[in-house]
Image: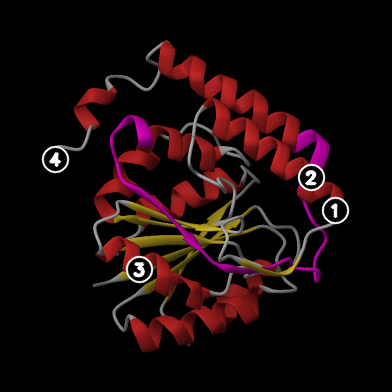
Amino acid sequence: MKLSVVIPAYNEEASIRRTITTVADYVRTTFPDGEIIVIDDGSTDHTRDIVRSLMSTYPLRFITHKKNKGKGAAVRTGALSAHGDYILFMDADMSTHIQEFDGLYRALVGGADIAIGSRYMNTSHVVVYQPWFRVILGRIANTIVRMMLLPRIYDTQCGFKAFTHETALILFHLQTMERWSFDVELLVLARRLGYTIVEVPITWEDSRDRKSRFRAVRDANGMVLDVLRVMYAIACKRYGDLDQHKKIR
């Protein structure tokens, strides 16, 4: 089986070299025919130079956005260009280590269409927590999302999600949100289409080597508004005829 690892990056000069080398070692050992796709989302630091310097050494494809479009846009660009039987996207700071894909892979091989990493399950392990206010606001926003759209999913926002190739093509073509709430949109669409989502406990560590771009209050509020937008879009059939994409069982 071939694995495509999609890494969205925006001003990640502090961590991108370590992340690429670590992911490349994992892919080379575990999925020898795999690929790594880095999408630079309009970085203004030295991220692009670092990635280009590694391209002759690792199985790396590099795509650039001239301007910053948002994490969701970067992930979509990478996923729609991927060739793997399985497509994983992960954060460039590697808060979730690439080896955690082992658990997601077992879920996909076991029949899941989507496997998502979770920080909030009983057997999850958080090594370094986010600042307390981000934890509280994140939990509140996540609870609202679960109550309104995604019951029985504990962690909708963890940046470590894997898809079968066919599932990814359908969902990312339907995706409209380009920033933080794109995860919620993808999962809601997947539920509506009857795809199997399996949540997998992971080990997670907050990255303290870079300045966070998640502005807690603003983005928590934005996430709730995006939930309402997704509900409205589905009700108004703005995604088109979803029935044609439903999984046949």
- Badge 1 marks a residue whose secondary structure is helix
Residue identified by numbered label 2: 136
Q: Is residue 55 visible?
A: no
For marks 4 and 1, give the CA distance.
43 Å
Check disc 1 and report the residue beneath it. 132
Labels 1 & 2 near each other (Cβ < 8 A): yes
Is 172 drawn above or below residue 135 in the view shown? above
Instruction: Give the structural element (helix, strand or loop) at label 2.
Output: helix
Residue at (37% x, 60% y) in the render: 87
The crowding category of the residue bearing disc 3, from other C-alpha atoms within 10 Å (few below 14, some 14 to 19, many at least 20), is many
| Residue picked out by circle 3 | 105
> Quadrant location of the C terminus?
top left
Residue 90 vertical position relative to residue 236 in the rendered view, above or below: below
Identify the mark nearer the N-term, 2 or 3. Answer: 3
Measured in 3D between alpha carbons, the distance from the residue under mark 2 to the one under mark 3, in whole angstroms, is 30 Å
Q: Are marks 1 and 3 in contact (CB under 8 Å)?
A: no
Q: What are the residue bounds of the magenta stretch?
A: 191-219
Mark nearest the camera among 1 and 3 is: 1
Label 2 with label 3: CB-CB less than 8 Å: no
- Amino acid, disc 3: Tyr
The amino acid type, in three-letter code, at marker 1 is Trp
Disc assigned to residue 28: none
Mark 4 vs mark 3: which is more N-terminal?
A: 3
